């Protein structure tokens, strides 16, 4: 796919280009000392199961050059394949890859998962790097546009990276680069012997990045750089170098203090109220392939694997239906009805009937960003009200060309019957992404509907596409086509009680992006962009005359709700005169509290207030300069 013109965020001005290093007091050549401990001897691996030809399993006995050649070939195919149907999972058996003299250095493109197969991140060590660089979306020699703003849909997990840049130039050797934005998680990663940079400061500018997730990981110096917002949960950090708009930490050892907010713009919770780590493939003590399903935690802090394997239960692969993209949805649905878990191998699945989960503790785990596409207006994933302890992880759900009422629906008790509080979430969503438009026209009234109580969202990106390959013409006319064709009225609607979120990203919906009607909601980092494409103010005005729909609305009857670290951004590129009254909209009650929220203009359009008429207007007179409200209501 050829490079696309810059569709996403407008540059924040050249001042951010060197922000990572200037604020950190680092030069590009800074490399922290340290060596990785040798991993324990690996168990003899059982024969690898048949997971399809898009799952590549590497063995530490393979020559480094052979591994690099295979990984590079996949990266070259995927580096610009933003809207493709290719999906890949690169899995590393326990052991050590690369040496000090011959490091293994690979890059990660779209729809690619890189993961170790040990019980602990220390079981699989890469001497070298696993990296993501900026994409140069224009190639004009006098005005390049090299950014990470569209670097979505990829992941790295369950590995130790002993940073080794031997053979790279001085700038590239200075860090392991993970220059990504939404839907690109880092989980269970131990970065040693060098810096982890969340931006790519080695390409031409402007080098922007926007949105990311680090969980259950450990690293020394982390260069935040131009990352506009980021969440770090249950991790260990040696040093965090700076912040741009909205950096949030929960249960993280070494997290910076939030004192002085918004300079720097840190939001820090000492502990994470509710957490549950993502399930992962690994080899058991006998070498058998299995899936570890971590236990839920309350009031947690630090990594889950500090004192041994992550607490949880292991499921043999025989407990899963190993699905392939050529199987019809009826086969997957019948497997669930028989009590099987689902392991979705990489690919795109057409789903013309709901995959209904009725049984407690069911796990649906996607490999390589497996994608479920709605067909005929179906709701691809439904969790029934009686099911408890369900986990959905590593999946993307796409709207189809016919209108779906929902794309994921977590059903509640009939008649709104109050369900007893539980310590294990009724359903956990880890790295679950929902998309309306992009690779094709998409239509869904509500993307994620949560009627169930006690749900945990742990990193989700709910996205009505602001760009894609649907066949719309470029420019304002194309945006109008998108507005009238890619239908996504609401992103997330929460009617259940005690729903929690750690890392909730919702963007570009045509009315309220998020509506929270349930009681006792708790959100740690919320990021939103209002839609870019309303044709006019008339299209972006509510029936009651209110200018626009807020990016985050708490229902008028709610009495208890908390949000820590939230941002709503505006970029009305069709009509820069469009305005929105409030970024956030909440009922005026003592139990409804917002901590560290902001709005910002990205060069077109305006937001009059941050929340409920409080907070300064943001508009194109000062693009990239946020308006903050420290606490609402004020103490």
Image (tube, grey):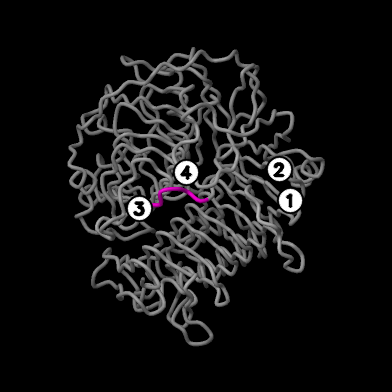
- Residue that mark 2 sits on: 362
- Secondary structure under badge 2? loop
- Residue that mark 4 sits on: 81
Residue 376 figure quarter: bottom right
- Secondary structure under badge 4? loop
Q: Which mark is residue 247?
A: 3
Mark 1, other Cα within 10 Å: few <14 / some 14–19 / many ≥20: some
Residue 278 picture location, percent across and down: 56, 40
Distance in Å between CA atoms under marks 1 and 3: 35 Å
Question: Are the residues tagged 1 and 2 within 8 Å (C-beta)?
Answer: yes
**What residue lies at 35% left-to-right and 20% top-to-bottom?**
103
Distance in Å between CA atoms under marks 2 and 4: 32 Å
- Asked whether 270 falls inside the magenta stretch, the response is yes
Ranked by sequence position, the earlier of labels 4 and 3 is 4
Mark 4, other Cα within 10 Å: few <14 / some 14–19 / many ≥20: some
Distance in Å between CA atoms under marks 1 and 4: 37 Å
Question: Magenta region, mostly helix, strand or loop?
Answer: strand
Distance in Å between CA atoms under marks 2 and 3: 33 Å
**What residue lies at 28% left-to-right and 56% top-to-bottom?**
259
- Chain part drawn in magenta: 268-273
- Residue that mark 1 sits on: 387
Q: Is residue 632 above or below residue 269?
A: below
Ranked by sequence position, the earlier of labels 1 and 4 is 4
Q: Is residue 618 above or below residue 77?
A: below
Residue 25 figure quarter: top left
Mark 3, other Cα within 10 Å: few <14 / some 14–19 / many ≥20: many
Question: Are the residues tagged 2 and 4 within 8 Å (C-beta)?
Answer: no
């Amino acid at each position: 796919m050829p490079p696309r013109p810059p569709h996403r965020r407008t540059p924040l001005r050249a001042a951010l280009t060197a922000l990572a290093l200037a604020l950190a007091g680092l030069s590009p050549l800074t490399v922290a000392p340290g060596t990785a401990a040798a991993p324990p001897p690996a168990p003899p691996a059982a024969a690898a199961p048949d997971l399809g030809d898009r799952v590549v399993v590497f063995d530490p006995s393979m020559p480094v050059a052979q591994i690099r050649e295979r990984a590079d070939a996949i990266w070259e195919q995927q580096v610009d394949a933003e809207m493709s149907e290719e999906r890949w999972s690169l899995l590393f058996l326990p052991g050590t890859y690369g040496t000090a003299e011959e490091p293994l250095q690979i890059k990660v493109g779209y729809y690619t998962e890189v993961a170790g197969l040990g019980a602990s991140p220390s079981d699989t060590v890469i001497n070298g790097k696993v990296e993501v660089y900026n994409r140069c979306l224009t190639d004009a020699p006098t005005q390049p546009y090299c950014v990470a703003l569209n670097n979505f849909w990829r992941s790295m997990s369950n590995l130790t990276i002993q940073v080794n840049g031997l053979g790279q130039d001085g700038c590239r050797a200075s860090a392991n680069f993970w220059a990504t934005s939404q839907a690109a998680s880092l989980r269970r990663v131990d970065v040693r012997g060098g810096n982890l940079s969340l931006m790519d400061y080695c390409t031409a500018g402007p080098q922007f990045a926007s949105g990311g997730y680090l969980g259950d990981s450990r690293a020394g110096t982390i260069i935040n750089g131009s990352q506009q917002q980021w969440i770090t949960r249950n991790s260990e950090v040696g040093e965090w170098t700076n912040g741009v708009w909205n950096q949030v930490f929960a249960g993280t050892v070494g997290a910076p203090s939030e004192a002085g907010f918004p300079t720097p713009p840190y939001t820090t919770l000492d502990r994470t109220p509710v957490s549950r780590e993502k399930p992962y493939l690994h080899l058991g003590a006998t070498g058998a392939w299995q899936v570890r399903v971590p236990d839920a935690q309350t009031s947690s802090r630090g990594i889950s694997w500090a004192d041994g394997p992550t607490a949880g239960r292991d499921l043999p692969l025989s407990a899963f239906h190993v699905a392939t993209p050529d199987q019809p949805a009826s086969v997957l649905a019948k497997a669930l009805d028989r009590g099987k878990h689902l392991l979705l191998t990489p690919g795109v699945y057409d789903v013309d009937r709901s995959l209904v989960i009725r049984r407690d503790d069911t796990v649906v785990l996607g490999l390589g960003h497996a994608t479920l596409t709605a067909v005929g207006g179906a709701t691809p994933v439904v969790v029934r009200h009686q099911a408890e302890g369900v986990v959905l992880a590593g999946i993307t759900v796409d709207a189809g060309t016919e209108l779906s009422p929902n794309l994921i629906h977590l059903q509640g008790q009939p008649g709104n019957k109050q369900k007893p509080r539980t310590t294990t979430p009724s359903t956990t969503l880890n790295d679950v992404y929902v998309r309306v438009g992009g690779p094709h026209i998409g239509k869904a009234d509500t993307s994620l509907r949560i009627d169930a109580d006690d749900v945990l969202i742990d990193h989700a990106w709910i996205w009505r596409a602001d760009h894609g390959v649907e066949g719309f013409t470029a420019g304002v006319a194309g945006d109008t086509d998108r507005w009238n064709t890619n239908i996504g009225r609401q992103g997330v609607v929460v009617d259940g009680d005690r729903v929690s979120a750690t890392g909730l990203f919702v963007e570009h919906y045509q009315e309220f992006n998020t509506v929270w009607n349930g009681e006792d909601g708790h959100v740690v980092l919320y990021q939103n962009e209002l839609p870019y494409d309303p044709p006019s103010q008339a299209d972006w005005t509510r029936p009651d005359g209110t200018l626009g729909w807020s990016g985050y609305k708490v229902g008028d009857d709610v009495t208890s709700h908390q949000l820590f670290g939230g941002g709503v951004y505006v970029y009305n590129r069709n009509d820069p005169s469009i305005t929105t009254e409030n970024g956030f909209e909440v009922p005026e009650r003592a139990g409804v509290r917002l901590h560290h929220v902001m709005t910002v203009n990205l060069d077109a359009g305006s937001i009059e207030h941050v929340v409920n008429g409080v907070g300064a207007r943001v508009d194109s007179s000062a693009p990239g300069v946020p308006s903050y409200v420290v606490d609402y209501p004020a103490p």
